[in-house]
Image (tube, coloured by chain):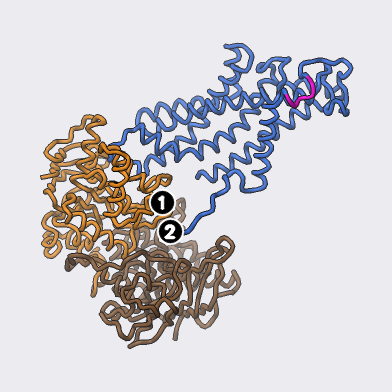
């Protein structure tokens, strides 16, 4: 049974790995809805998110303001929708950058081996030892509060996380005989890495990125919560949890609850998808 | 002389994998390197194709000595046209995402200046020469059996038109009935004036079938070498005799080595 | 009197919405102290058949037919009874000993554990017995070896430790699944010799599963050749190698290169081996068989007795090699 080859047997096109179980379909659905909300914010948000309305200050949920109003009377629903933009965009940038840098380092280390690998691996170990929030705090201290500083800090923090897993996978792939065969054929190192290693690592890269995205959302929200990330009055879920806590004391819990809940949803969806994709990639 | 290896040595850390190994391969000849695990036979193969750098000794291929200096891209492609390799495991020696036709065309494109149409035709010719049909060109490795995959690996190596083909236990992982097919294929390729072989194997019966001369290795050193039929008919060294005696054949009884 | 008897045994595993047959209509008996070789290529179902004897079937597999061990049916008995059988009377030697011996426990622990737990031997006696067993399998310095760990031993030595552990329970039947495939030829020769000696001394029966017809012929009394989930030929070992009756068995023997003579071209069996579920109707071997006739693809040939051989070929009487 070692070679169940089935010539002539048509395989049905496989469902994308992310859509096989109900949990995954729900996760994908939620992320799509949130991304759409972020993109369409100007169209679907019922109010200007930054416009205070004193009559709605700490207002309860009502037909006109579904999630009520915050301390200065801005519509919470509109702020949640607009907040999706900053809350999701930052982590997205973090993941794209850290995956690009981490993936390159991983393949470089696995391909070159020897000293290059040693230097890269030790460097990553050092970065790995520092909590991600600390990086964000350092870049904020240097560059001043705001999204760019947070994104830069978290990118540095996430790179070793991505690179370490990919390095061992790349190493395993690099030691397969087909890579040796390509080398003996005279293919360049770059061609082998780009045409063979990278495509074979892609499923794992995607899985990594999806699950890391959830963590990046939490980390960025935490920085915002500390008041070091996105600055008020920009709508941001992390900030809303912070300002919402105050409102909650004064009887309007919806602001903190809705923002907090959405953060949890994104993280959970990312984990569900990432785990599953990770299994597929193996 | 296509290959001349003199005093080859390879050390990994403390361990000596290959020690003072010398042999030569004539044009059109099939040379077997025989040994058990740990004999260093695979390390020799990897040094021949440039996957390992010898710690000592020289390898001369087609009259040019392989220097330890890092070769340029052009130099590596020239060497590729001198020597190619087929590995043991038909599963991992192909990229699981690359279609069969693409495997062969990639190596054609790397070495010969042809139009895409010519390249495609040549690819089909090559597949045909290893007993695969046009329909196989569009398949992924997982759609092929072990024997078919090994044929693809052979076609990939032949695409480069090498002077020497190194076969590293190339039939060891195949079913008995498939093994015979591949051995016949290799004999055909050589008869068509294809290339010389260095056949790395632990299997004396297979070696007997495929090689003109054999080198017996043990613990990194050459124990004995000579024409294969003579070497197997009348082994001069005790170790070669033991190896030969251990091969199951009609009337054979397993024996314990004297303690 | 037969020790084990497979009667019309079959096995299928669920696949998508239906079943995939892996083994079909297997009849096989092994006598007290007899050595039988079950020979076949990949997909033949040889391993699956052997493992079914000790209840090691794939999850959710469906079996048909009967397996009777020492007068008692094995198919469908309780897990506890099966475990008892496995620990006392039938033992298995695997292809890769490293995968079946706990790497973090010493050889001594590995060998004595079963004796202490299953046979109720006192720990000190168990160690003494382990040393004796190691001597039996050609490992003289047993005391030292007992203190070693698996990674300190070569594949050949470890396989002998495995055999010693099997002998420790003094089983009536040893199932050996490609026990020497991962070993060098010299180690293979020794391991088979040791297995044979120990077996003869104790009157233990053996079922040797292998792809190597020559090895099986040299070490077994009787051979059964499997193809696509069925046994196509059963004969005494010597008779089968001298005069195979089934075209597949004959083809296997001829296509293997010989160390004594060189064929200009090896006589080959065209095509590739198939598993039972891939086989066409009729004789599964027919598409690869040079003697196939239209009738061969119409019906599955029944096993028939011809001159002391049991052969599943329509043309067995006319064909000779």
Which chain did the image draw in brown? Answer: C
Q: Position of residue A216 (x, y in %)?
A: 61, 28
Task: Check contact, mark 1 vs mark 2: CB within 8 A.
Answer: yes
Q: Secondary structure at mark 1?
A: loop
Q: Is residue A133 magenta?
A: no
The label shown at residue C208 is none
Residue numbers of the magenta segment: A43-47
Please name the residue shown 61% across and 23% down the image.
Answer: A133
Q: Nearer the viewer, residue B226 or B61?
A: B61
Residue B139 has which mark? 1
A234 horizontally vs A271: left or right:
right
Q: Nearer the viewer, residue B65 or A21?
A: A21
Regarding residue B120, the answer to whether it shows in the image is yes
In the picture, residue A238 is in which quadrant? top right
Q: Position of residue B140 (x, y in %)?
A: 42, 50
Q: Nearer the viewer, residue A187 or B131?
A: B131
Question: Image height check: is C87 above or below C313?
Answer: above
Instruction: Name the disc covering residue A7, or none.
Output: 2
- Which residue is nearer to you in this view: B127 or A230? B127
């Amino acid at each position: 049974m070692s070679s169940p080859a089935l010539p002539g047997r048509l395989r049905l096109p496989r469902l994308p790995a992310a859509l096989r179980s109900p949990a995954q379909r729900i996760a994908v659905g939620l992320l799509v809805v949130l991304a759409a909300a972020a993109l369409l914010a100007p169209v679907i948000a019922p109010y200007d998110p930054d416009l205070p309305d004193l009559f709605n200050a700490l207002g309860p949920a009502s037909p006109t303001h579904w999630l009520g109003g915050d301390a200065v009377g801005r519509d919470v629903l509109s702020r949640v929708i607009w907040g999706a933009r900053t809350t999701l965009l930052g982590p997205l940038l973090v993941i794209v950058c850290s995956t690009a840098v981490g993936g390159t380092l991983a393949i470089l280390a696995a391909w070159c081996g020897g000293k290059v690998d040693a230097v890269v691996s030790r460097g990553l170990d050092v970065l790995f030892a520092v909590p991600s929030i600390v990086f964000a705090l350092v870049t904020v201290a240097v560059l001043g509060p705001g999204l760019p500083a947070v994104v830069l800090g978290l990118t540095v923090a996430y790179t070793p996380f991505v690179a370490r897993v990919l390095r061992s996978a790349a190493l395993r792939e690099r030691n397969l005989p087909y890579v040796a065969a390509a080398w003996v054929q005279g293919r360049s190192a770059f061609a082998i890495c780009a045409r063979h290693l990278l495509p074979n690592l892609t499923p794992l890269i995607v899985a990594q990125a999806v699950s890391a995205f959830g963590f990046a959302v939490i980390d960025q929200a935490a920085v915002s919560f500390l008041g070091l990330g996105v600055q008020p009055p920009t709508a941001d879920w992390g900030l809303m949890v912070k300002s919402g806590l105050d409102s909650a004391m004064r009887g309007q819990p919806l602001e903190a609850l809705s923002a907090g809940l959405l953060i949890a949803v994104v993280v959970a969806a990312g984990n569900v998808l990432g785990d599953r994709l990770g299994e597929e990639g193996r | 002389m296509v290959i001349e290896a003199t005093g080859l040595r390879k050390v990994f850390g403390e361990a000596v994998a290959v020690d003072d190994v010398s042999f030569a391969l004539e044009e059109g000849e099939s040379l077997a390197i025989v040994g058990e695990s740990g004999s260093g036979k695979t390390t020799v193969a990897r040094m021949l194709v440039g996957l390992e750098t010898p710690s000592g000794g020289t390898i001369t291929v087609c009259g040019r000595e392989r220097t330890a200096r890092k070769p340029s891209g052009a130099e590596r492609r020239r060497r590729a046209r001198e020597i190619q390799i087929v590995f043991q495991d038909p599963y991992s020696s192909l990229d699981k995402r690359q279609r069969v036709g693409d495997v062969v065309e990639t190596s054609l494109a790397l070495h010969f200046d042809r139009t895409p149409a010519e390249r495609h035709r040549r690819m089909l010719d090559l597949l045909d020469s290893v007993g695969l049909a046009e329909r196989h060109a569009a398949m992924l490795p997982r759609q092929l059996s072990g024997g078919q995959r090994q044929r693809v690996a052979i076609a990939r190596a032949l695409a480069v038109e090498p002077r020497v083909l190194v076969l590293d236990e190339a039939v060891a992982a195949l079913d008995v009935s498939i093994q015979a097919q591949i051995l016949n294929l290799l004999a055909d390729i050589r008869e068509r004036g294809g290339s010389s072989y260095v056949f790395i194997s632990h299997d004396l019966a297979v070696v007997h079938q495929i090689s003109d001369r054999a080198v017996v290795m043990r613990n990194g050193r050459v124990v004995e070498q000579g024409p294969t039929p003579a070497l197997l008919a009348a082994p001069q060294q005790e170790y070669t005799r033991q190896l030969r005696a251990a091969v199951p054949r009609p009337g054979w009884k397993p024996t314990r080595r004297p303690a | 009197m037969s020790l084990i008897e497979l009667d019309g045994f079959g096995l299928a595993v669920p696949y998508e919405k239906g079943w995939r047959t892996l083994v079909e209509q297997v009849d096989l008996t092994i006598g007290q102290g007899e050595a039988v070789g079950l020979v076949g290529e990949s997909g033949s179902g040889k391993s699956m058949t052997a493992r079914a004897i000790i209840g090691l079937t794939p999850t959710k597999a469906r079996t048909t037919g009967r397996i009777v061990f020492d007068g008692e049916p094995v198919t469908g008995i309780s897990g506890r009874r099966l475990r008892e059988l496995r620990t006392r009377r039938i033992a298995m030697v695997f292809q890769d000993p490293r995968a079946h011996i706990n790497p973090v426990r010493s050889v001594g622990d590995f060998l004595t554990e079963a004796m202490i737990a299953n046979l109720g031997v006192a720990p000190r006696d168990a160690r003494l017995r382990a040393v004796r067993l190691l001597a039996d399998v050609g490992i003289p310095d047993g005391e030292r070896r007992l203190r070693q760990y698996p990674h300190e031993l070569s594949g050949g030595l470890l396989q002998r430790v495995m055999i010693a552990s099997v002998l420790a329970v003094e089983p009536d039947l040893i199932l050996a699944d490609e026990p020497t495939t991962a070993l060098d030829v010299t180690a293979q020769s020794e391991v088979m010799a040791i297995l044979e000696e120990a077996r003869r001394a104790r009157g233990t029966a053996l079922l040797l599963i292998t792809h190597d017809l020559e090895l099986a012929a040299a070490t077994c009394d009787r051979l059964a050749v499997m193809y696509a989930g069925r046994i196509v030929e059963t004969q005494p070992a010597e008779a089968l190698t001298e005069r195979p009756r089934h075209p597949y068995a004959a083809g296997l023997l001829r296509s293997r290169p010989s160390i004594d003579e060189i064929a200009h071209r090896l006589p080959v069996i065209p095509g590739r081996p198939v598993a039972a579920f891939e086989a066409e109707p009729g004789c599964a071997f027919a598409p690869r068989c040079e003697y196939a006739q239209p009738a061969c693809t119409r019906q599955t040939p029944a096993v028939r007795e011809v001159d002391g051989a049991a052969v599943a070929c329509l043309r067995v009487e006319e064909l000779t090699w």
